[in-house]
Amino acid sequence: MPDRYQTDYQIGQDNLRRWGMDLHNPVFWITAVLILIFVLGTLMAPESAKTAFAGAKGWSIGHFDWLFMVGGNIFVVFCLVLIFLPFGKIRLGGIDARPEFSTLSWFSMLFAAGMGIGLMFWSVAEPTAYYTNWFGTPLNAAPRTPQGAEAAMGATMFHWGLHPWAIYAVVGLSLAFFTYNKGLPLTIRSGFFPLLKDRSWGWFGHVIDIVAVLATIFGLATSLGFGAQQAASGLKFLFGIDSGIATQVAIIIGVTFVAVISVVRGLDGGVKVLSNINMGLAALLLLFVVLAGPTIAIFTTIGTTAVAYAETIIPLSNWIGREDEKFFHGWTVFYWAWCISWSPFVGMFIARISKGRTVREFLIAVLLVPTLVTLVWMASFGGSALEQAQNEIGALAGGISDVSLAMFQMLQNLPLANISSFVAIVLVLVFFITSSDSGSLVVDSITSGGMLDAPVPQRIFWATMEGVIAGALLFGGGGEALGALQAAAITVGLPFTIVLLVMCVGLYMGLAHEWRFVQGPKARADQQ
């Protein structure tokens, strides 16, 4: 059988070499122009931009809620099936490939890039919001009741468990397989080669990669803005420092500076080191909350949350006849659109660090292990928050007033509040840096035509641009501009849902081909 992946395309063949950079033509230039137009337009009319993009976001969520829900469910089932198929034995990079990073470092990097900043921002705020009926309750559960508390924890796990990680896993596995096993560029378009063949290198592929870069840049810049808000709120909470725009911009500048240094140092000397620090600090903070907080209640909450997750995953995955439309659209559909818009960034970064892993090992580590870690994290932080809200302790008893403050309001009612809050601020900032760092490597790869090691000036450029975009929008347009950026990222999630569904088809075709004609015969020969 002829090799269906045979192609004359050479990585970087369409690139232009300028200013010490290796730039894909036309992806880099079109993307740069579109980003510039968006930033300038938003700065000139932030309220109008927010209104326009919020309208587009609302239209996407309102008319295509079914597509987001169907897509999310398909991704979970697809990944779980792949774990048990013979394809699971396929090794990324070929039969003789071995992992580049230790299991601990690998997991630390994928977790830091995928969920870290989100867990810090929402682990306290989200369960409390559901329990107190802040923008709806899951499945119309009665607020401020024991049943409402269980529903709150189950819904929180639903939003941070299997579904988002399956979205990232589809992109990550597809790119890792086609890059390391088939020698194709590390860009989103490579996942479509079984379907598009050499047309992948033409305008079909250009459009896919441009959308991926825009989704990544908008998503990252939004996260930088929200991360800066949470860090600034923490500094005001602890030290009385003004949490206004000036402080937030200063935080972005500082984080961007460190991210640039990390990017220059590369994966081994930058992202890996920071990710390991991240996981160590996160483990310490988690241990502190478990020991200093309501320990028995937390351990009980782990069990009840797991049960609630199992009981609600199917009803919450359903989109037909939902009576909790406010919650359904405002939380679940929003989250799926947000995760899909983030998937090019997180998925490609996971692919970049996963050479040498088997498909089964990859999916277990990317899908199941983070879900278990998230269960413990959410039960500890969210459970402590609900315990305070239920017993009328502290600010959370009155519900959510400021999402960026929720974590610190929970820690305030535990011993050593100042120390734990300071650690939380540091953790937010380091997660902040690793997200920017890994995102820069991803955008760098796409805009260089899939090169694994693009020139250092190119990495510096994108790391700097992420900070400049977030800082400029915050400084020039404040919350309105940041809201416009977030709405734009969510809107991009709609077309990218279709991209990911097609990517599943291409990935299955690729794995089937690899198992049938390459690694499968070798495995069967070894067993004989």
Image (cartoon, helix red, strand yellow):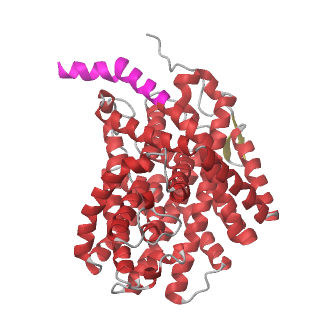
Quarter-wise, where is residue 269 in the image? Answer: bottom left
Asked if residue 435 shows in the view, the reply is yes
Position of residue 343 measured from the top left corner of the image (x, y, whole percent): 52, 47
The residue closer to the viewer here, 100 or 58, is: 58
The residue closer to the viewer here, 398 or 443, is: 398
Q: Quarter holding the N terminus? A: top left
Residue drawn at 30 percent across, 63 percent down: 376
Position of residue 33 measured from the top left corner of the image (x, y, whole percent): 77, 48
The residue closer to the viewer here, 180 or 199, is: 199
Asked if residue 255 shows in the view, the reply is no
Q: Quarter holding the C terminus? A: top left
Quarter-wise, where is residue 55 in the image? Answer: bottom right
Residue drawn at 60 percent across, 49 percent down: 61
The image shows residue 204, relative to residue 38, as above or below, that is above
The residue closer to the viewer here, 264 or 319, is: 319
Asked if residue 25 lies left or right of residue 189, the reply is right
The image shows residue 275, relative to residue 353, as above or below, that is below
Q: Which residues are magenta?
A: 505-528
